[in-house]
Amino acid sequence: MDNLLLNVEDLKTHFFLDDGVVPAVDGVSFHLRKGETLAVVGESGSGKSITSLSIMRLVPAPPGRIVGGRITFAGEDLLAKSEKEMRDVRGNRISMIFQEPMTSLNPVYRVGDQIAESLVLHKRMKKKEALEQAVEMLRLTGIPSPEKRVRDFPHQMSGGMRQRVMIAMALCCQPELLIADEPTTALDVTIQAQILELMQELQRQMNTSIILITHDLAVVAEVADRAVVMYCGKVVEEAPVAELFENPLHPYTRGLLNSIPRLDENVDRLFMIDGVVPNMLRLPPGCAFAPRCPEAREHCRETAPRLTRVAPGRLVSCLLVEGGAA
Amino acid sequence: MLRYVIKRILLLIPVLLGISFFVFMVLHLFTTDPAALMLGQHATNEQVAALREELGLNDPVWVQFFRFLSDLVQGDFGRSLMTRAPVLDEIFSRFPATVELALAAIFIAAIVGITVGVVSAVKQYSVFDYFSMIGALLGVSMPIFWLGLMMIVLFSLKLHWLPVSGRIDIGMEPVHITGLYIMDSILTRDWESLKSALLHIIMPATALASYSMAIIARMTRSTMLEVIRQDYIRTARAKGLKETVVTYRHALRNALIPVITVIGLQMGVLMGGAVLTETVFSWPGIGSRLVDAILASDYPMVQGSIIFIATVFVVVNLVVDLLYAWLDPRIKYS
Amino acid sequence: MAELAKATVETAEIDELHSPLREFWRRLSKNKLAMVSLVFLLGLTLVALFAPYIAPYDPINGIMEESLQAPNAKHLLGTDELGRDILSRIIFGARISLRVGLLAVAIALSVGTVLGSIAGYYGGKIDLIIMRFMDIMLSFPSLLLAIAFMAVLGRGVENAVIAISIVTMPEYARIVRGSVLSVKENEYVQAARAIGNRDAAIIFKHILPNVMAPIIVRGTLGISTAILETAALGFLGLGVQPPDAEWGTMLGSGRGYLFNAPHLVYFPGIAITLTVMAFNLLGDGLRDALDPRLRQ
């Protein structure tokens, strides 16, 4: 595969707590091509955010630690890098946007200074030059009168504005990869659409690859090329987005799809997946989804399924899918 | 911002009026007759009555208060019964020593307290954290005058490292510029005086600082622990900043906002503590003078010193509030 | 059957009433430092109560021939300048320190609670007047204000209690006012008012029980402040007067013998530090046990 940007192989990130070990990310593999948008989908606690923090090597430690696997980014092994080398990657070649624009900006510094900080650090710009570039970035993200707003403190801006600032901050060094962790979840629906559009627009301009972490399949349908579905620290299905929506293979994916509200269907109540995410300290021996799965059989509770290729570009981890038990 | 400052300064006036009224009333209502005190035990009743008339003590209370107030405004705090010198002169001659001691103490308390608090938070549950929190517990529980005595026993009497008492060796006083010996000796490049002043101030200032240092260390630690968990710290790390930059530029600046308030509150503790420390180390400041005045029932001196110290305290608090508003951009100047 | 159901409901209610207390005790007893402090303070209280039986010597009348002895087998902590046994004086000193500490906090707490409740409950002009007054008192450094009161009241232990209660009172008033304001608008208070309860009844029965937690915590920590300030007044010669044994006064008079008999200032200081530390740790423990949300 040429034009491969990121390859995650068998990544394991565990949390060592007093009560035991939580395998928050447990053997996750996926890849990302240049210019592509990959969605990582799952409920909260599925390990999708920890996966992204693992790529950045920002897993809170202790108690968390990357215990196995390989992360190759543009041909370089990220897990083999020193902390100093890693700092040259963060914010420069890989950037991140977080869920909470209200709290993700430092309240005591002007937004311009916060954007400029990255440019001074990674692009060796002078402060003045960096601030001018910050104005340009704010203009690019569609903030009106950016030369004034650059002097604003975060609390003087709305949530949508702050998320634009976060995007400006993340993209100012023209990173090869942008990881967006639930970038629109905290925003109003109308603002959500604007932010997603902005991300796509900037992706086209800068040829950035995006990993979009979300629990919202509606967002996935709108912007992603491919999707990886995660459950309890494992990948349960991977597919191009169109095929995933057309023909979901894993019962969990079907459950997620059924819980999207549709305007064209008159449903009385939203379908929800029964039950809750199991306690990560005491995972069931078989398929982790079995206790909640409406189609589970006896052997699902005993044998753990493996992620298996069932068609070109399609992987699933389910004993019920033909070939899935291999 | 300027309007806010002016408004806050104007708001000081009623507070200062209240303080003066309060001190005046308390002393007026409860103390023994100042005329009798001034004349001593052998005075006749007629003499006392004559002096009462002369001093205006027979006028209605409110007339006396307004006379007192108009005197105060003109800088007339009365005369000390002990030395017969104007109270304000006494205060001004003693005040620099107290300012120097308090500044040295708050400096030590803030620098050590913040540093210990930050390191304890960054290395939570480490040996350093453990011991510094035991130290902080001792700091808030030990009477500062006892700590002072213990330091004298150890560093002066046993080890002979530091002088027992006083501000500076006799004859070493630097040329008077600000009245603060350390500052004056630096300004005049009088290094011998500087050395002597530093050796004298180190124990009283550290003893005075101990309580505030402990409070500041605890406060810094707990706010740092809270700030380190914030989302914007993760953002800073995701930018690729060094951990030291994350800690000092992004976390500390936020953690300092509540710490500044605590430091401001400590000024009051320090001024109360100065009375004790000055007594322990025979430091010639306003606090030890106040205690002498009370023991000698020198009540114009007591009244003057208390009003003066309270005024300084109120002004310091105002400065701290303004500093706070400047540090935290979220505060509205209203 | 119906009666049985009713009885069960009642027991359930009683359990509900008891369980917060039990839950509080369960949390407090898990805090080792707080429990050690509690045991220490209970022990100290017993020592204070039975001081005449425990103390090996008379704390007031010494034996001049045995003055300024270093700690030895006969006098475990040595003797002072008048030949009095320091251990005995420290034991009797516990009486004064604990009494002054508890009494000062009790007075300050009662007056502060009444003023704070009135200010918070009625609001308006009364609130303004009371709180302005408290603000002015708080604008003095507290030890300085206590010293000023001692100047007008005269020296002595009773006056020390009064001075310390006055200067610490505004803080309690402020806490109570704040708490009253926060529960005043709750529905159960509105309901109590609607059925025609008198204001005093509403304040005492319905509001104060709900603001007890911060008051108890502040009061416990306040005892350590009161003990420290009593000692400070004693040290300056303004508080408890000789020959009475009080820890701060002992330090004040022992100060003159630093060079040849430093043991005079060792032990009273240790006694103050340990007692104050115990009240601080107990106060912190109570805070954590009463309101786990306040915990770091």
Image (cartoon, coloured by chain):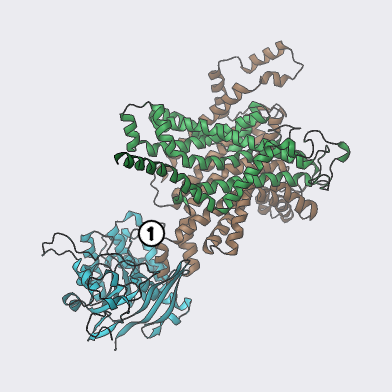
Chain colours: A cyan, B brown, C green
Question: Most extreme residue toward the right, as rendered?
Answer: C65
User: Residue visible at 73% across and 42% down?
Assistant: B282
Q: What residue type is labelled 1?
A: Arg
Whether C74 is drawn above or below B127: the answer is: above
Quadrant location of the N terminus of chain A in the rendered image: bottom left
Total numbered badges shown on the rendered structure? 1
Depicted B170 relative to depicted A140: above or below:
above
Q: In which quarter of the image is residue C237?
A: top right
- Which of these two is toward me, C142 or A279? A279
Disc 1 secondary structure class: loop
Q: Nearer the viewer, residue C229 or B190?
A: C229
**Which residue sits furthest bottom?**
A1
**Percent coordinates x, y for residue B222 in the rendering:** 50, 55
Task: Write down the chain letter for disc 1.
Answer: A
Asked if residue A237 lies left or right of residue B231, the reply is: left
Image location (x, y in percent) of residue A127: 42, 67
Q: Which residue is drawn at 26% across and 72% down?
A: A202
Furthest-front residue in this view: C1
Q: Depth check: B292 or A312 in front?
A: A312
Residue C84 location in percent, x, y?
81, 38
Q: Position of residue C294 (x, y in %)?
A: 46, 50
Mark 1 nearby-residue class (10 Å; few <14, some 14–19, many ≥20)? many
Q: Quadrant of the C terminus of chain A?
A: bottom left
- Asked whether the viewer can see residue A149, the reply is yes
Q: Name the residue under label 1.
A: A110
Determine if residue C235 is in view. Answer: no
Seen in the picture, residue C277 relative to A231 is either above or below; the reply is above
